[in-house]
Image (tube, rainbow, N blue to C red):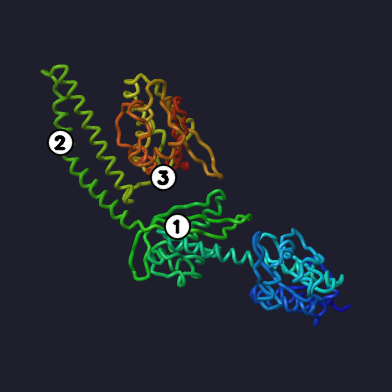
């Protein structure tokens, strides 16, 4: 048995099938066939098609006059007609035609005797809306004889197909207007904007992007982002980032800062905020980038850091000298009154705070300039916490706070920088004591697994004044203190937690906070666990 022959249907026949209209009467070569082809030919402009349609309908139907009008609640505008414009407008001014075109659905009416202009030549009037009645197109037919059933069926088919064509044309016009508005909006943004497709090729590139990169919208459109948004290193940074974000379904927004090279070789620093647009199957189909030139801000930041670095170094020399002289005086306090001894102690404390501030400023500059030296090796968290808690025990006793450290019943080795880790826990535990006026501070460890990876977490729990949940992110920013002086008398520049977070993340760890106002705070620091480099036999 021979294979069945498959015939591809032309677009208009597929449309007839979707409209559930039998095509037995629409035969190739017939007028109806030509009419449907005309209506569905999107290469023909809508108004040009209307002009051809009225002529074709006058030949196909027993109608003496055919018009296409666009009506509003207050007026009728002639779009196309078989009569000359003056005669057509004269007929359409009739109050009867106005009532006819204001009906909700298709109507056919006998023209009343009182309409002398119309009755002189026509007996019946038909009105078929093409889509929405309000501000929509309509076909108006004037005829001496009533349309036959076959002609009515043809008109209903034409009405349905033409309504779809008008609707599609309206949507295309609206889309073009919105595209033009979007183009005007994006090109007049002060910041660069780029839109990339699923293959990371440019689909939109505004004028600020041209100022940053040297590539015009026309030159950039269609090209891979690496070709027009160039970097010395990590050329595929966006593709690598996309692969990371595909494995984390809830993450779609990112922010990066780096140096780019323009077309003429000029270098500038940019801040890039982006968003990945996903489909239902979690495939990234579009990427939107907002790019801001931060070259001047970067230069100002560098000058500020340079000033802080120089000023801090200059301060360290007299601070060290003052500390030495105070130490000499404190060795022999004989002959000093009690008041003088108090002044000496307070001077030493103030000098230590000033020395600590200078060190914090230097560390902050090193972090921001990515000059932080990290020496990773296996370290024992138990030993570090033993030393830190021992050093801070006196401070806790001085405030009357119950201070406890519970050594874990398991090995607590991690890969980290021992000095930096000591600074992290000294700062966190000192903060817990600082912001706890009564109650307790407790340090303890846990061990857990994430995706089969063992991790160790250190909790520093206090019963202090607490932190509002809206400040969880703010507390890790530079120079930020969320408590006012009425709540706490302790001084500080607001750099400690910024340094702690930077140290932890530079060593591959994570830090989090959980707190309730008036009930206390728990800071948790976790690192991947590692093997004891010198296990006991």
Q: Residues within 10 Å of mark 3 (few under 14, many from 20)?
A: some
Residue at point 44%, 32% (across, down) = 468
The answer to whether 437 is drawn above or below residue 323 in the figure is above
Element type where label 1 sits in the image = strand
**Residue at image mark 2:** 321
Q: CA distance from mark 1 to mark 3?
A: 26 Å
Residue 497 percent across, percent down from the top left: 37, 38
Element type where label 2 sits in the image = helix
Contact between labelled residues 2 and 3, with CB atoms less than 8 Å apart: no
In this view, the residue in front, 54 or 314, is 54
The answer to whether 150 is drawn above or below residue 287 in the figure is below
Q: Nearer the viewer, mark 1 or mark 3?
A: 1
In this view, the residue in front, 225 or 524, is 225
In this view, the residue in front, 403 or 381, is 403
**Residue at image mark 3:** 505
Residue 476 percent across, percent down from the top left: 39, 40
Q: Earlier in the sequence, mark 1 or mark 2?
A: 1
Residue at point 29%, 31% (across, down) = 491
Q: Quadrant of residue 163?
A: bottom right
**Residue at image mark 1:** 290
Q: Quadrant of residue 387?
A: top left
Q: Residues within 10 Å of mark 2 (few under 14, many from 20)?
A: few
Q: CA distance from mark 1 to mark 2?
A: 51 Å
Q: Is residue 352 left or right of residue 77?
A: left
Q: Residue furthest right?
A: 1
Q: Nearer the viewer, mark 1 or mark 2?
A: 1
Residue at point 33%, 51% (across, down) = 370
Q: Residue furthest left?
A: 335
In this view, the residue in front, 230 or 169, is 169
């Amino acid at each position: 048995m021979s294979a069945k022959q498959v015939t591809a249907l032309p677009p208009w026949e597929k449309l007839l099938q979707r409209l559930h209209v039998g095509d037995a009467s629409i035969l190739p070569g017939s007028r109806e066939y030509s009419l449907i082809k005309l209506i569905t030919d999107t290469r023909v402009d809508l108004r040009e098609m209307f002009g051809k349609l009225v002529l074709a309908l006058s030949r196909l139907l027993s109608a003496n006059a055919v018009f296409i009008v666009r009506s509003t609640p207050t007026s009728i505008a002639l779009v196309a007609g078989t009569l000359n414009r003056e005669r057509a407008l004269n007929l359409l001014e009739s109050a009867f035609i106005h009532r006819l075109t204001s009906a909700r659905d298709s109507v056919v009416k006998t023209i009343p005797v009182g309409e002398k202009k119309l009755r002189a030549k026509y007996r019946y009037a038909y009105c078929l809306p093409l889509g929405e009645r309000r501000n929509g197109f309509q076909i108006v037919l004037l005829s001496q004889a009533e349309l036959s059933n076959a002609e009515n069926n043809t008109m209903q088919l034409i009405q349905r197909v033409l309504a779809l064509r008008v609707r599609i044309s309206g949507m295309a016009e609206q889309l073009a207007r919105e595209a033009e508005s979007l183009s005007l909006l994006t090109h007049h943004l002060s910041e660069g904007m780029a839109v990339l497709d699923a293959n990371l090729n440019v689909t939109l590139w505004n004028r600020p992007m041209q100022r940053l990169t040297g590539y015009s919208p026309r030159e950039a459109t269609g090209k891979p982002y690496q070709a027009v948004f160039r970097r010395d290193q990590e050329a595929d940074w966006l593709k690598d980032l996309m692969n990371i974000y595909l494995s984390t379904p809830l993450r779609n927004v990112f922010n990066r800062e780096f140096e780019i090279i323009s077309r003429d070789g000029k270098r500038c620093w940019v801040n890039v905020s982006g968003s990945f647009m996903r489909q239902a199957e979690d495939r990234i189909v579009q990427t939107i980038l907002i790019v801001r030139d931060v070259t001047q801000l970067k230069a100002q930041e560098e000058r500020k850091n340079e000033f802080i670095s120089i000023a801090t170094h200059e301060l360290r020399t007299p601070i060290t000298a003052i500390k030495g002289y105070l130490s000499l005086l404190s060795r022999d306090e004989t002959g000093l009154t009690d008041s003088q001894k108090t002044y000496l102690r307070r001077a030493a404390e103030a000098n230590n705070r000033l020395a600590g501030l200078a060190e914090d400023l230097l560390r902050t500059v090193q972090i921001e300039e990515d000059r932080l030296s990290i020496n990773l090796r296996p370290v024992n968290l138990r030993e570090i916490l033993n030393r830190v808690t021992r050093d801070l025990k006196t401070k806790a006793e001085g405030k009357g706070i119950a201070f406890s450290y519970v050594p874990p019943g398991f090995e607590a080795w991690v890969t980290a920088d021992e000095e930096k880790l000591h600074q992290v826990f000294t700062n966190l535990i000192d903060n817990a004591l600082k912001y706890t006026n009564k109650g307790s501070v407790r340090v303890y460890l846990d061990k857990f697994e994430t995706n089969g990876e063992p991790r160790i977490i250190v909790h520093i729990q206090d019963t202090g004044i607490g932190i509002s949940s809206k400040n969880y992110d703010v507390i890790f920013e530079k120079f930020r203190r969320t408590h006012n002086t009425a709540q706490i008398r302790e001084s500080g520049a607001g750099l400690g937690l910024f340094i702690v977070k930077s140290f932890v993340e530079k060593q591959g760890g994570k830090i989090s906070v959980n707190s309730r106002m008036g009930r206390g705070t728990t800071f948790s620091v976790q690192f991947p666990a590692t093997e004891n480099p010198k296990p006991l036999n």
